[in-house]
Image (cartoon, rainbow, N blue to C red):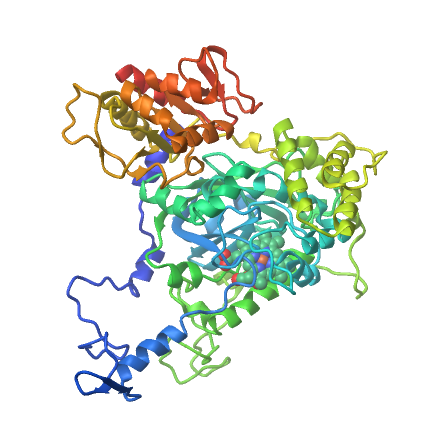
Amino acid sequence: MSFGESVEKAFTTMTSTRKIGDLQRDIQEPRPNDPLTTDHGVKVSDTDNWLRITNGSHNGPSLLEDQIGREKIHRFDHERIPERVVHARGAGAHGYFKVFDDRASKYTFAPVLTDSSRTTPVFTRFSTVQGSRGSADTVRDVRGFATKFYTEEGNWDIVGNDIPVFFIQDAIKFPDFVHAVKPEPHNEVPQGQTAHNNFWDFVGLQPESAHMVMWAMSDRGVPRSFRMMQGFGVNTFTLLNASGERHFVKFHFIPELGVHSLVWDEALKIGGQDPDFHRKDLNEAIENGAYPKWKFAIQTISQSKEHAFDFDILDATKIWPQELVPLEEIGELVLNRVVDEFFPETEQVAFCTSHVVPGIGFSDDPLLQGRNFSYFDTQVSRLGINWEELPINRPVCPVLSHNRDGKSRHRIVKSDVNYWPNRKNEGRPVPPEEGGYVEYAQRLDGIKKRARGEKFQEHFNQPQLFYNSLAAYEKVHLVNAICFELSHCEDPVVYKSYIDILNNIDFDLAKAVAIKVNGEVPTKPGRPNHGKKSKGLSQLDFLPKEPTIVSRRIAILITDGFNAVEMQAVRAALTSAKAVCYVIGPRRNFIRPMSGQDFGRGVFADHHFEGQRSTLFDAIYIPSGEEHAKTLAKSGRVVHWVREAFGHLKPIAAVGEGVDFLRNVVRLPGVDLFVPSHNHDSDEVVTSYGVITTGKYSISSAVTDALQIA
Ligand code: HDE
């Protein structure tokens, strides 16, 4: 199936699932003229004036007896709940999960992973880690990628990230790590940044973090969109099949649109220009029918091969290289519905790594073991003990337990027994053959002590593998990112010592950083580079099968006197290819076309030049029109728009006088039409026969088609 067809199919697939049906029970849809009531249901006649003593011209004291006034203020006083201690800022959406066939049944009997007749409802929440709820979306950070699968056998949560490894190996280090990365204790600075002393101090002293630091400083740390990120379960889980055999497993989500990033300059600017950029992007795509979609893949290792690798497969600072453990694509995840209200859905959704269903289990991964405690625990301080009864969290299958009471209990169980065993056989434990969850009977032999396994001691082979696998320009971005961050560390002990870690990864990398940040430039490598590479580490390995402009934001720059016939044709072609076009003009109003073109009052501009910035768009198109091109050239803002987009290597299409304007602005003589091509090997600007390679994606076919129409 082509990409276009699969988008089309996603488009027509049901946007409603059993979970959406379940949520309807709690959804209220007010209609015009519906009366306002108190929370106890009494209609309210005046919500603007507190009940008070007044003599007509002067107000006397306000009365405590005003139940309506008190209720309003009292509810407001308690609107905030504690934000998540990490991953506080996020955006979520509903969707569904399906497997292609039963090929995973050799590993698991879990129907969610084997029964292709099922459509499992899901809710996915993406997040940043460091910043608070009000921080910006485009900061350099890891992104959370957490999915709740509402299966018929209970809820299953994959609480993952967009990076396949983690900073630490043992859960007991998590509070240290989070304290170090979060704003510093004395001044609560910085917000949404790892660029500070304490983070780099910690990672410099904790070499197991080296691998994750490399990923976070790479382009992965500044995704273009949540929809263009991979997702990873990170920890090692297990699968159990019907014959009782166990496999270790890693979970992967691979985005259909490819893996794309912002450049750092864009990320920095968008942080101020539109701090909600990723949140809006997710909603915009879903509302336009370009449903975000990921292939779901697993890597499996049979129990007998657990020790067959030179790394420990239970170490969350290591990947399982694809050359050793291939990925098997078994299903797909589609997000097709935005939330109706942010707080009850995205804020109250609560994920737990310990939520698994029969056929899926844990491993002894020491990070996972700690996470299994932490998520459950934290939900209680955020949401209260009955958090699993909240609409967004409750399963779609029947729930009956003898756990009772606690704050904000919703469910009413009509029974006179709440314990097991009971004379009525209510709430009986279920044997495995009837679907009861059973832990795998695992043989264990060891000494109880505080220690980590032998292979947990090696920290640099895989950061090297990652670095070696990047394209040349990805390496440049990585060096620049580390230099940016270390430049924000004032303490020389911090920035000088990190060079030693880098020198254990790559000599040239360490030298390049040391020179820029005033570190000690190493004279010889800390250890030899093994020279190995692996697939799936560079973002270039995840280009979509066919170049696509689906859901890409294109700015059309016009002023009075533009060629509206041509512009409308190009816009129609881009829109039919499912790009999202915005017309930007000198004012948010009708813009007059060139003389002789009959367009009534003209074409309406969605925004004015000052109201938006080039950073918020993926490409620019400048139509022809003499008067229009001359006016564009006189506007400093427009010139900056175009130069900035050009500097970010974005595709820029121009026609006729638009080309003259563009040529003057970017000073590239002899180029008639800028049609970006699909060359990701380089981010250099190549101008042979009117082609600019952008290192990003292609809008060529849509633009050339449109020009033929015009
Ligand atoms: Fe989390 N993490 N984490 N984490 N994490 C939380 O749980 C924790 C880790 C991740 O959208 C908290 O509900 C420990 C790895 C995501 O609601 C908390 C350890 C990965 C989210 C917590 C880790 C993650 C969280 C805070 C080390 C990638 C947001 C609020 C042992 C696989 C989920 C909450 C959402 C959230 C603990 C490490 C991903 C405190 C102890 C590794 C996506 O429980």
How many marks do you count on the picture?
0
The residue closer to the viewer here, 498 or 7, is 498
The percent coordinates of residue 598 (x first, y second) are 14, 23
The percent coordinates of residue 392 (x first, y second) are 40, 62
**Quadrant of the frame with the N terminus:** top left
Q: Quadrant of ligand 1?
A: bottom right
The percent coordinates of residue 633 (x first, y second) are 37, 24
Q: Quadrant of residue 5?
A: top left
Q: Is residue 23 in view?
A: yes
**Relative to 309, is 569 above or below?**
above
Q: Quadrant of residue 587?
A: top left
Q: Quadrant of residue 185?
A: bottom right
**Relative to 85, is 579 above or below?**
above
**Quadrant of the frame with the C terminus:** top left
**Residue 135 left/right relative to 552:** right
The residue depicted at 80 percent of the width and 43 percent of the height is 500
**Relative to 179, is 99 above or below?**
above
Q: Is residue 441 in view?
A: no
**Relative to 55, is 218 above or below?**
above
**Residue 68 left/right relative to 184:** left
**Residue 421 left/right relative to 78:** right
The residue depicted at 80 percent of the width and 50 percent of the height is 457
The percent coordinates of residue 251 (x first, y second) are 56, 46
The residue closer to the viewer here, 342 or 410, is 342
The residue closer to the viewer here, 602 or 334, is 602
Residue positioned most to the right: 524
The residue depicted at 21 percent of the width and 63 percent of the height is 30
